[in-house]
Amino acid sequence: MFRIDNEGQWLDELSHFSPNHNNLYNPTAPEIAIIASRLYQTADQTLTTDSSVYDEFKLQELLFAPPCLAVSEHFDEILNAPAHTFADRRIHQSVNIVKQWEFNPAVRASMADMYYLPPTHIETLGWCLGGVINLTPVELACQLGQTVFAETKAGYDSWLAAPAIQRVFGFDPNERLAQVHGYQPMETSSLMKSERNSHQLHWLPFADNGQQLAGQHVQKRFNINQMTVELIHSDYDGFVQQMQVQWQYGYQRTADYIQQHGL
């Protein structure tokens, strides 16, 4: 539905801000993990027009792991993909942990949306089609971290987002969201073991962002005559103002939560 002009150049410019690489821009930035997905197939599978063989193809969640986790002695344990519970015939059970990776391909793989942006090919992984497979990876965060801040989310609309995700990934995103919001982390992590490792999961109240930030997003509308989706956006100054409003909303909500809970 969309494309990024000068994609390679744009990603090269973005890579200068990468916290996972040594750079002079911000050497104290925290490391990050990136989630994407890929078309999974066993080594002996080949493309064919036989529909019975097509049924064997699955999607697999990818975790581009930051260096501090990739070198962890506990990081070779199997991570399970939460969406597998809802779509076991469509989504592979295990998460593919990628320890050696480059910033640009990982960002592009995570951005690849099944309808908005085309998939991208990474030689060692195959075709990658975005992080929609796990948009709220709270279970993964609780397995890897000691203190986790997660954002509550509004439900997916039933006329566009939910059908699109279910058609491609095979699960109802609202069922997955209910699972996420009801998740209770274990007292100790299976991966990052330490004496002071007691999980604390903090839910930041962001589910009302649609109402609180009404008019502060890029809008979309359908052009029935051309069968396209058009973006309605402000000029540069208007965009800066929108970003400032969104930032202030998130910053203030988080600051209020931290203060109320004495963190």
Image (cartoon, helix red, strand yellow):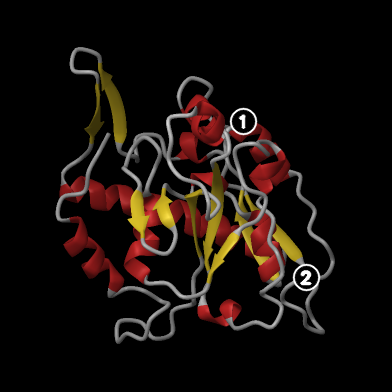
Q: Secondary structure at mark 2?
A: loop
Query: What's the mark number on residue 190?
Result: 2
Q: Secondary structure at mark 1?
A: loop
Specify whether 73 is left or right of 60: right
Q: CA distance from mark 2 to mark 1?
A: 28 Å
- Above-or-below relation of 238 to 161: below
Q: Residue at x 15, y 55 (%)?
A: 6
Residue 97 % position (x, y): 57, 66
The residue under label 1 is which amino acid type? Asp
Crowdedness of circle 1 by 10 Å Cα count: few (<14), some, many (20+)? many
Specify whether 244 is left or right of 39: left
Quickly name the residue at label 1: 172
The residue under label 2 is which amino acid type? Ser
Furthest-top residue in this view:
225
Q: Is residue 247 visible?
A: no
Q: Residue at x 34, y 35 (%)?
A: 215
- Above-or-below relation of 111 to 76: above
Res 12 → quadrant = bottom left
* Quarter placement of the N terminus: top left
